[in-house]
Amino acid sequence: AYLDRITQVDDAVGAFLHVDAEGALAQARGVDERRASGTELGPLAGVPVAHKDVFTTAGVPTTAGSRILEGWRPPYDATVTQRLRAADMVLLGKTNMDEFAMGSSTENSAFKPAHNPWNLDRVPGGSSGGSSAAVAAFEAPLATGTDTGGSIREPAAMCGLVGAKPTYGGSSRYGLIAFASSLDTPGPFARTVHDAALLHEAFSGHDPRDATSLDAPVPPVVAASQQPDIAGMRVGLVRQLQNGSGYSSGVTQRFTETVELLESLGAKVVEVSCPSFEAALAAYYLIAPSECSSNLARFDAMRYGLRVGDDGTRSAEEVMSMTRAQGFGPEVKRRIMLGTYALSSGYYDAYYGSAQQVRTLVRRDFDAAFENVDVLVSPTVPTTAFPLGERSEDPMAMYLADLCTIPANLAGNAALSVPCGLSPEDNLPVGIQVMAPPLADERTYRVGAALE
Ligand code: GLN
């Protein structure tokens, strides 16, 4: 049924870069056969899932939304992919994304933009916009994403879905094509908090193949998603993440009502100040490009995918340069240049060094806040989904979509976006973000469940 739905609507939605109909049907039949023979099945047996194209899938094309990886079939599965398979899920295909996960609208995909199923002239968010569009358009019940600066929470909010950024190190990056390694975090998309929790638990947990993976039990998010009781919970309203210029009045209205709802459910709401959050966006846009400039050096025309100009007359360096010039899109090039500059000697302390200091201050602001509250809340995105094309020529406007989500990435915290109604301005979905300390992911799910 989901494959049929994809056939019907995906030309208009653009959620998938690759649909693996044969593979999906074979997996589904395999599950049926093993069920019939009485074999024990994985926890999500037979449930279809749309998988972000940034995770390697053995033998199945994986592009990370980039021409430079066009035609590449990885020889191995990412840990997240492996765990989806171990849960006996059915992998429908690979979802559209901003190239190398750099963007907030999926318009930086080298192949095609994805569209917001609520209004096809609007963006579905990004960078995991193919995943959010797929679930919102009923092309899949669940999807995976990655969140480096907001790429799960922002598209979830824009498409009226639940999306979680687990604690950094709580879900494995092994086989996740790297953008900014100190921030990249795999997480789930779903229509409900409980569904998101089921997927979250299915692929999370310690992985010896990722050096930053936490050797700790998976936070009990499934149990929390069934305990919507928040009486007595202390909820902090981040002063720096609301009401400023750039927040649309429809978002502010729904957010304010949702905070009142939390109060009426017994939560104790207080305002909290996190002054360094005002510098978080600027710090992120030095740290993420710096890490990307280093990570993307591996695309050297020799190892994977595209190779341009290799006609026997050119040097390896020329081939590398031609391949990278043609293979990377404008946003990726912008970030490689910014990052290379920020890391270069003479500028390192002023840019990268200062950004790392801001990162420490953000972490301290979180630590201080969590001495007095259990969770922090803010709107997930300052606006609803914007029109396709509106911000694609204006990187700064695009970067502002991540204003509220970035602090949790810099500090490695757990965060969840939950729908909180439609904006009265344009009838598009609004999301509220719930943030918790590292490894306290379950708190965000409890609040999410209370709001459903
Ligand atoms: N939109 C942010 C960026 O462009 C975040 C992306 C992400 O989380 N992958 O970097």
Image (cartoon, rainbow, N blue to C red):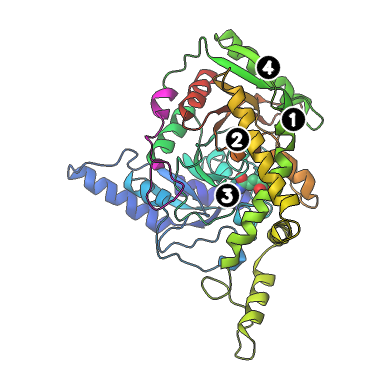
**Residue to which mark 4 is pinned:** 271
Residue 408 tag number: 2
Is the residue marked by circle 1 packed among few (<14), some (14-19), or many (20+) residues within 10 Å? few
Left or right position of 196 against 69:
left
Examine the residues drawn in magenta and state their main secondary structure: loop
Q: Earlier in the sequence, mark 4 or mark 2?
A: 4
Q: Amino acid at mark 3?
A: Ala
Q: Is the CB–ligand 1 distance for label 3 below 8 Å?
A: no
Q: Amino acid at mark 2?
A: Ala
User: Is label 4 in a helix, a strand or a loop?
Assistant: strand
Please say whether residue 233 is one of the residues in the magenta stretch: no
**Residue to which mark 1 is pinned:** 426
The residue at 50%/61% (across/down) is: 62
Viewer-nearest residue: 240 or 266: 240
In percent of width and height, residue 193 lies at 48, 28
User: Is label 3 in a helix, a strand or a loop?
Assistant: loop
Please say whether residue 206 is one of the residues in the magenta stretch: yes
User: Is label 1 in a helix, a strand or a loop?
Assistant: loop
**Residue to which mark 3 is pinned:** 15
Of badges 2 and 1, nearer the viewer stands 2
Q: Earlier in the sequence, mark 2 or mark 3?
A: 3
Q: Amino acid at mark 1?
A: Asp
Magenta-tinted stretch: 203-225
User: Is label 2 in a helix, a strand or a loop?
Assistant: helix
